[in-house]
Amino acid sequence: MKKTKKIILTGDRPTGKLHLGHFVGSLRRRVELQNSGEYDKIFVMIADAQALTDNAENPAKIRDHILEVAIDYLSVGIDPKKTNIFIQSSIPALTELNMYYLNLVTLSRLQRNPTIKNEIKMREFENSIPAGFLTYPVSQAADITAFLATTVPAGEDQKPMVEQTEEIVAKFNSIYGDVLVTPKILLPTNENCMRLVGTDGKAKMSKSLGNCIYLSDDSETLKKKVMSMYTDPNHIQVSDPGDTKNNPVFLYLSCFADESHFAKYLPEYKNLDEMKAHYERGGLGDVKCKRFLINVLEELLAPIREKRAYYESHLDEVFDILKNGTKAANRQANATLKQVRAAMKINYFEDTSFLSDAKDHFKAVKQ
Ligand code: TRP
């Protein structure tokens, strides 16, 4: 019954446009994995139901970002011929799986989930945490297991979710039999990309902190954002030695620049190590570094922008891609739900032994 195929499931909440943090944390990897041909199936989910767990009063925001995120996906190279892009709330099987899995976790385990803890603090929920929010890791386990996913490419903040999924899978399989597949998270290999810092140097690029470079930013916006980026505040004169470790310009370069960029835009250095060494000993100015970063990012974003412009003027096409992806996703999730219900023996109307067992039972009672 258990599938040993290689299957990917991952997704994003449609609460805003996707930015460079999403790109290096997960999107870039998804496209590579998609094009590697190594996976039997790939599902990328627009997690609108999860987004509603802390936006119940603001459904318009979520609705407005469905196509926005879909276009972000398509623009970075997620190919609907190879990847099913779908909408979470249109997969009813997920809510049913969530219902059964909720019985397999404790409240205290949910309260210990580090990502949840952190999000509760950030959102200042204090004592009014929506129950759906606290339990969204369980719904995420439903997302992952419904597709029998073996692989979840995601950023570091998703690690606790995948761990919680592993626990639910283990518990389910030990009670009901070997039905669910244990997933593995696939984190970015470059440490700086796990959680890309904001343009202000703050720990995380995040819409609420207003420190993002969006995949949809135009050239002018990109230039402005990079030019006003935080660097080393003690690097005042060009000749001063500078710090590259807590310096977003260098952290970004480590995620985006390769030797070909140096050859093309900054040939005086062969690679980032040489450039860093110069900055650290003094003599390399911030403006020069920022200009280089703009070139590097422009090379990345220009083709993404072009594709975006195409999809923005072909919204019917985007809509159909979502519709078809969601149809395929429903097929898979329903098949898994069917196995789950059978394993739990709650599929009374499909299970021919249900009525005959009952008949035997009542006959036995009478005798
Ligand atoms: N939690 C993810 C986010 O915040 C979205 C998400 C929902 C997800 N379900 C998932 C990611 C399953 C990976 C796998 O963006």
Image (cartoon, rainbow, N blue to C red):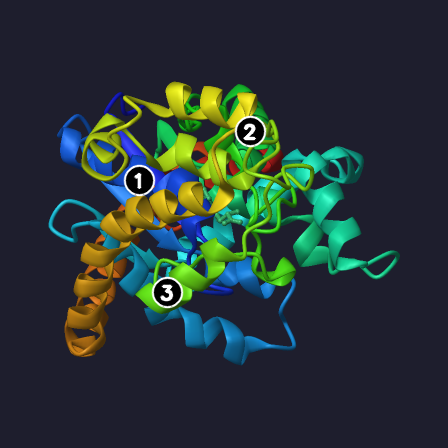
Q: Quadrant of the N terminus?
A: top left
Q: Find residue 232 and report its horizontal and vertical position in percent.
A: 63, 38
Which of the two residues, 37 or 304, is positioned nearer the viewer here? 304
Badge 3: residue crowd in 10 Å (few <14, some 14–19, many ≥20): some
Residue designated by label 1: 28
Which residue has dot 3 on it?
A: 217
Compute the Cα span from label 3 to label 1: 17 Å
Q: Which of the 4 image quarters holds residue 151?
A: top left
Residue at horizontal 69 percent and vertical 44 percent from the top: 116
Q: Which mark is residue 339?
A: none
Residue 35 or 4: which is nearer the viewer?
A: 35
User: Which residue type does callout 2 highlight?
Assistant: Thr
Q: Is residue 330 visible?
A: yes
Q: Going 36% across and 68% down the picture, which residue do you hit?
A: 220
Mark 1 and mark 2 residues within 8 Å of each other at the beta carbon: no
The residue to which callout 2 is attached is 244
Q: Residue 360 location in percent, x, y?
A: 48, 34
Give the image quarter of residue 280: top right
> Cβ–Cβ below 8 Å for labels 3 and 1?
no
Q: Can the viewer see residue 347 in this picture?
A: no
Local packing at callout 2 (Cα closer than 10 Å; few below 14, some 14-19, many 20+) is some
